[in-house]
Amino acid sequence: MGLAWVISVAFASAHAGPMPAGHPWSDAGLNPDARARLLEAQMTQDEKFQLIRSYFAGAGPHKPSQKPVPPGFIGSAGYVPAIARLGIPALQESDAGLGVANSDALRPGDSATPLPAGPVTAASWDPQVAYRGGAMIGAEARAKGFNVLLAGGINLMREPRNGRNFEYAGEDPLLAGTIVGATIAGVQSQHIISTIKHYAVNDQETARNTIDVKLDEKAMRESDLLAFELAIERGKPGSVMCSYNKLNGDWACENDYLLNQVLKQDWHYPGFVMSDWGGDHSAVKAVNAGLDQESAAEAFDDQVFFDTPLRQAVASGEVKQARLDDMVHRILRSMFAAGLFDETAKRPINEQADLAVARHTLESGAVLLRNQNALLPLDVARLKSLAVIGAHADKGVMAGGGSSTVRAKGGNAVPGLAPLQWPGPIVYHPYAPLAALRKMAPAAQVSFADGTDVATAAALAKKAQVAVVFVQKWAAESVDWTDLGLPDQQDALVTAVAKANPHTVVILENGNPITMPWLGQVGAVLETWYPGGDGGTGIANLLSGKVNPSGRLPFSWPKDLSQLPRPELPGAAGGEAPKSVDYNIEGADVGYRWYQRRGIEPLFPFGFGLSYTQFEHGTLAIDAGKLQAKVSVRNTGQRAGADVVQVYVQVPGSPVRRLAGYAKIFLQPGEERTVTVPLESRRLADFNTEQHRWVVRGGAYAFSLGRSAQALDAPVSVQVQPSR
């Protein structure tokens, strides 16, 4: 059909409007499958084909620009026109998981509230924080006219140089699955379809469109796929977005094992699979392998596979009509389940309330990595002078690059920074820490140096009571870091400032772990990743003690590249792109399990984080029958704060421990409570590829209470019955 929008009566209206009265599928008392069956039965073949592919009006690798845009397209990642005859609303799709993006500035002047980077939410170890963040961006999406949000990024951090780690939720499948599942549930609470992505094992950006990922089935099911499985169970996303890469020889978007055998058969997933933009490579193979909707084909795929080629395949019998009907049913079913037919009201955006959600996310997930001699929190009442240095802290806070970049109100605080083209430009959200710190300490002399002149910065720091140095490293979609070092001589800057002032605090704005050659020289380090909306205020609240840091790392922090399963990342610095990557080196032992297996001590372990107060734990009690742990926690310090109870398990015959459950608890000074921690049964089991199910070995299981994956109490041995 190309761009001949007028050939179908279905294109006559961009928005279906209220569902016409009298349609049997308008009965909201019926379940989504029943409603989808009733509606599907009334659709023509052309209408079915219309529903199984989306359009894009921006630039793409195969089309500099798609004009004219389809009627009703409000401008974003994708669009499926309405079918007015049947009351089927248009699908208006927006990037992404950190807020409502404005891809290619297709909506001039439109802005949204940016959440902090994904690891911030994961570091909160609090599904309620994740849910509220999802609900906020879902509500803003609805208010802007969108009903599909391309959210739910959950690729595990196998590669600490991955340019998109800032969109994801760390290295552990249980933590990532529960946090991302809660985010998805929050998005969909606003009658928005959320995706989960990128399915699957799309764990690096280097050669992402061509690389063949090698990973055995057992390892895959116990790591990357387990994260998806848990998040899908909890969040029930309306769509799964398949990834660009190949997996064990087949493209992810035409991979029968991933889409049919695991997702739709084993997990009984009822929603639809959409391709990533440029991720489809065929009609017959993709459809028969389980792909349900082709995304933005004119702009990104080699051809529009889900039009003429698929029509011919259906006519010839290579693709059964029943399979086409199943594709349509799955899309309609997700639309009904999310309320797209029934909930059309838009609520106005409350900018201040939404900024408060973003700020609270940062305050819940920022991780205090170092705090020598209780340098933090700052004694604001006695603070006379403060030097603020580096990272454009006088203008704003850094954001990650690519399709997830949100255009905050006020625009880019530091425009014109390269790269100006994709995946740039580099964006700073206009929530300046400097202004927030001045407001935090109105009686203090707060001075700023941009950090480009190390001597000037050190001189300013020497005259101040406390120096706060902001350091940064940009990460972005489609490119990976080549190393873990800070760019632009920032290590020298920190070293000089710390030498000039022993009361130096370092604030990190980064997408991935970084090396810290100056760590032992500074007083405190606070990890904020990309801080998001009202980030400056959140940072000030954390430094002043108005908020007590309670984040715990969602990934292991290596000392250097030599500690990684793959110290080299071929192709990241240019040159010949790698044809494959071997993830069987670590297999299911991603992150902290790799460090345990190899006896390596990282710079900071998974689950690590400091507080301005102290917590005392009682004796761990395990009820294997109820799959729960109990422990008393007491705040023994002088400040209110939150602790994260982490329970790890070592199954018989395994050399490594696995996170089996966690819970976050807020306590006033002196308060003590008993915490019940649900344990995930699949962390006590192994995936048996011959039996094709999770199997508990049985025997003596060692459960440990941990302050991190490395700092563990004495194990409690519990007899667990084997699977039958």
Image: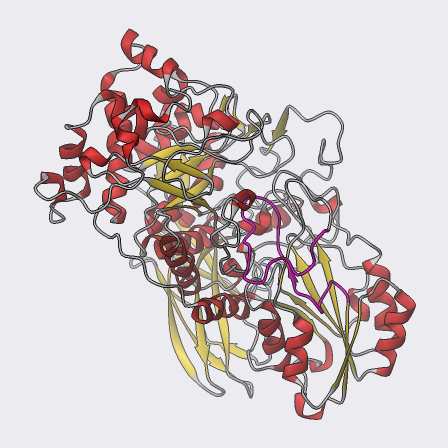
Tell me which segment is drawn in magenta. 390-416
Query: Residue 621: image x %, image y %?
Result: 39, 68
Which residue appears at 27% of the width and 34% of the height?
330
- The correct choice, above or below, for 174 with respect to 86 in the image is below
Query: Residue 580: image x %, image y %?
Result: 62, 26
**Left or right, 265 with reference to 424:** left
Q: Quadrant of residue 213?
A: top right
Q: How is the image coloured?
A: secondary structure
**Left or right, 631 with reference to 610:** left
Query: Residue 407: image x %, image y %?
Result: 55, 55
Q: Nearer the viewer, residue 627 or 164?
A: 164
- The correct choice, above or below, for 369 with respect to 262 in the image is below
Q: Nearer the viewer, residue 96 or 616?
A: 96
- The correct choice, above or below, for 507 with respect to 190 in the image is below
- The correct choice, above or below, for 251 with respect to 516 in the image is above
Query: Residue 669: image x %, image y %?
Result: 49, 87
Rendered-image quadrant of the N terminus = top left
Residue 229 covered by magenta stretch: no
Which residue appears at 58% of the width and 33% of the height?
584
